[in-house]
Amino acid sequence: MQKENQLYNIQPADRLANVSEYYFSRKLKEVARMNAEGKDVISLGIGSPDMPPSEETINVLCENAKKPDAHGYQPTVGIPELRRAMADWYKRWYDVDLNPDTEIQPLIGSKEGILHVTLALVNPGDQVLVPNPGYPTYTSLNKILGSEIVNYTLREDNHWQPDFDELERMDLSRVKLMWTNYPNMPTGGNARMETYERLVDFARRHDIVIVNDNPYSLILNDRPLSILQVPGAKDRCLEFNSMSKSHNMPGWRVAMVASNPTFISWILKVKSNIDNGSFRGIQLAAAEAFTTNTDEWHQENNIANYRRRRDIAERIMRTLGCEYDPGQVGMFLWGKIPDKYADVEQLTERALHEARVFITPGFIFGRNGKRYVRVSLCAKDERMLEALRRLRALEW
């Protein structure tokens, strides 16, 4: 009989050797420990909106949560009300026509979508183009799934747009998919119709699928764009959008992918074998937010609120001696650190441990981010002002 507490020589799957715990998962544990010690760290790290959704959205959720028949499993395709609301929202903001029955798939967050799209379109050993700097999950999930990462360069002197001359010089024979993200995170580089048009043309000529991640287009941006506005884009492109940023619903995990019916059917084939649709009340409340959030709500929550905070973030950057592009959009501010620092963590670790302010070092987004920091605008005005006060109290 084996001993109850016997240790077994169990090893993790080989794929885990290619990735580490997500930076924010690790770093926020450290912040939590510091807070538990009474240090009151101000986090300007992650992009998690701190404001609530609209009152109408919350009311619909509460009303449906009280219904005794609302708590069963939901269809993976999403309820019709949500799909129609998503299609109407795309028409309202981007003037893009989407068939709610065949060209939209609701997601439990865009992170899930990255997984499902990769499973549906990319075989192990296929190459994928990933921006540098870029969202770390594009790299980590593709590594886990056995894709070969090929980075393409985003540069400040090119306004963080793809360098198409560099792309055309690459050996693209094994590239299956290209990840893009405009408005860009972490750099704040805005979407450009010229970039979208060139991406669609590039995809068509090289038989590559473009996946554009588009959750920031309504934040501090008076000209929201979608890659699906380009004629013929649906044939080669998918686009993610999310309620996390523009509707103050990050914890609700409601997002979508839009494309042609064939791509959507492939994603559904994957998704239906992994999960179900989210709680019916969440889907109905999300449909309410898509439908009834007014222009006034948008202006206050996505423009005026972040404009106030952005002004404070710019003062933080100047205090740290960082340079930044005032034309950035989205809910972060991206700044270049002074030459006197050997590496970015000299600055960010000092800010954390001496000023008790958590700022994101740019190296987590790739090699091209190693001389940059990112400040989140997702903290109350008074907390951002306190962060500024603490940082000003130090000699930089």
Image: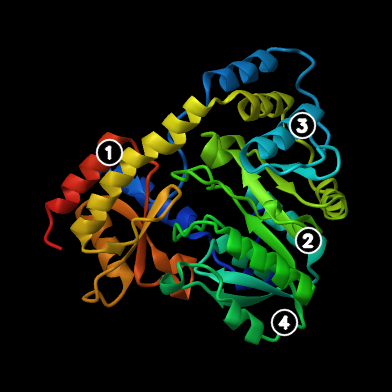
- Type of the residue with mark 2: Leu
Which of the two labelled residues, at mark 1 and mark 2, occupies the earlier sequence position? 2
Q: Earlier in the sequence, mark 4 or mark 2?
A: 2
Amino acid type for the residue under numbered disc 4 = Leu
Q: Which residue does the numbered mark 4 point to in the structure image?
A: 172
Estimate how packed mark 2 is, as few (under 14), some (14 to 19) or many (20 or more) residues with alpha carbons within 10 Å.
some
Q: Quadrant of the N terminus?
A: bottom right
Real-space Cα separation, disc 3 to disc 4, in angstroms: 37 Å
| Kind of residue indicated by mark 3 | Arg
For this view, does 318 lie left or right of residue 184? left
The three-letter amino acid code for the residue at tag 1 is: Arg
Which is more foreground, mark 1 or mark 4?
4
Q: Which label was assigned to residue 383?
A: 1
Look at 21% across and 52% down and name the residue there. 355
- Position of residue 384 measured from the top left corner of the image (x, y, whole percent): 27, 42
Q: Note whether residue 9 is visible.
A: no
Residue 310 visible in this rendered orientation of the protein: yes
Cβ–Cβ under 8 Å for marks 3 and 1: no
Q: Which residue is mark 3?
A: 84
N-term-proximal mark, 3 vs 1: 3
Lower sequence index among marks 3 and 4? 3
How many tags in the picture? 4
Q: Nearer the viewer, residue 328 or 343?
A: 328
Among numbered discs 1 and 4, the one appearing first in the sequence: 4
